[in-house]
Image: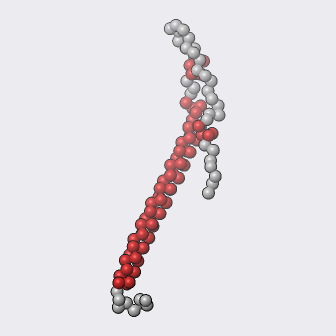
Amino acid sequence: MRGPVDRGPLFTSHSAPDPVPPLPAGPHPLPLKNLQRAFPHPCAYSHRVSELHRAAYEANRKLEERGEKLRQLNDTSSGLESEAAAFADMAKRMGKDTSNPLKFW
């Protein structure tokens, strides 16, 4: 079994965008440079998004595998429980039967 995994890098940014500049006073439109800094192109983050998507997909797949293993374990334990109950019932019936040649006491 593997040890704990450091998931901190998943939630931190390696290259944080520059802080958004304050809006200029008055009705003047924002210069293009400020707009580009305030709203970076989506492609700048596409690599990071695909990494997070891949990590989420892998976590979901492992969760589904674990759920399937737990269902199989539950089915197996239910079968063993019913077999044990049947065995106990048979042992009680054999113990009550006085003509049973296998009873030696």
Residue 1 image offset from top left, x and y in percent: 62, 57
- Residue at 47% across, 59% down: 70
**Position above or below: 103 against 67:** below
- Residue at 48% across, 53% down: 64
Say which quadrant the C terminus sits in: bottom left
Residue 55 image offset from top left, x and y in percent: 56, 45
Q: Nearer the viewer, residue 11 or 94?
A: 94
Q: Nearer the viewer, residue 8 or 80?
A: 80
Total marks drawn? 0
**Position above or below: 36 against 85:** above
In the rendered view, how is the structure colored?
A: secondary structure
- Residue at 37% across, 80% down: 92
Residue 25 image offset from top left, x and y in percent: 54, 8
**Position above or below: 7 against 34:** below
- Judged left or right of residue 48, residue 63 is left
Q: Nearer the viewer, residue 59 or 94?
A: 94
- Residue at 63% across, 44% down: 6
Residue closest to the far top:
26
Residue 48 image offset from top left, x and y in percent: 59, 37
Q: Kindly indicate the quadrant of the structure image that contains residue 96.
A: bottom left
